[in-house]
Amino acid sequence: MKFLLSLLFTATLISVFPVEKSEAVRIKDIAQLHGVRDNQLIGYGLVTGLSGTGDDMRRTKFTLQAIYNMMTRHGITLNPERINEIRIKNVAAVMVIATLPPFAKTGSTIDIQVSSMGDAKSLAIHPASTTHSQLNEEQLISAGVTPDFIRLSIGLEDIEDILWDLHQALSA
């Protein structure tokens, strides 16, 4: 009974007081933004460098697993029981961290930090074909990346080991 009375009362109000035509209002026209913040981006990836500069696949199983997963996703059939037989000497597992500022637009530049997760102490990469591969020729030149440019990330290895690795990689 109460429900019917409520329904009747609502119908009477609607018929007695006509509803005014309203206009649509965009939220951005009536709202204010407070507390805009940066967005933290964290990722995992594989980087390739010069021969002999990557993770030791016998000690960093997650790098080996990531390579296996990537290859199978790209349609390369591998026997999972023989994953330990994969021998790659120039791949390292890395964590990629970036801060995306509020209201960043397509094409905005951001700073990133790439950190080795495995046991690669030093890494030599070709930025034009790896970290900067999305840039066109003009953008590469503007960034100081030439076709023969090699970036060395030197870790805490003995200098003799680093020089030997570089010599081996460059003579290959």
Image: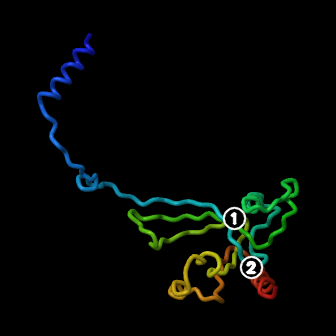
Left or right of residue 149, residue 16 in this image: left
Q: Front-most of 48 and 168?
A: 48
Q: Residues within 10 Å of mark 1 (few under 14, many from 20)?
A: many
Q: Is 150 placed above or below 108 here? A: below
The C terminus, quarter of image? bottom right
Which of disc 1 and disc 2 is earlier in sequence?
Answer: 2
Which quadrant, please, contains the N terminus?
Answer: top left
Residue at which label 2 appears: 50
Q: How many numbered marks have been drawn onto this rendered protein structure?
A: 2
Give the amino acid at mark 2: Leu
Q: Which residue is mark 1?
A: 93
* x, y percent for residue 53: 75, 75
In terms of depth relative to the viewer, which is nearer, 79 or 117?
79
Q: Amino acid at mark 1?
A: Ala
* Cα distance in 3D space between marks 2 and 1: 14 Å
Q: Which residue appears at 39% of the width and 62% of the height?
A: 102
Q: Where does residue 163 sit, x and y in percent of width and height?
A: 76, 84
SS category of the residue bearing label 1: strand
> In percent of the image, x 71 and y 68: which residue is there?
92
Q: Which secondary structure, mark 2?
A: loop
Q: Which residue is rendered at x = 68% and y = 66% of the image?
A: 46
Residue at 53% x, 69% y: name it.
112
Label ID, residue 6: none
Picture layout, residue 76 above or below residue 14: below
Left or right, 66 with respect to 107, comes to: right
| Residue at far front of view | 15
37 over 159 or under it: above or below? above
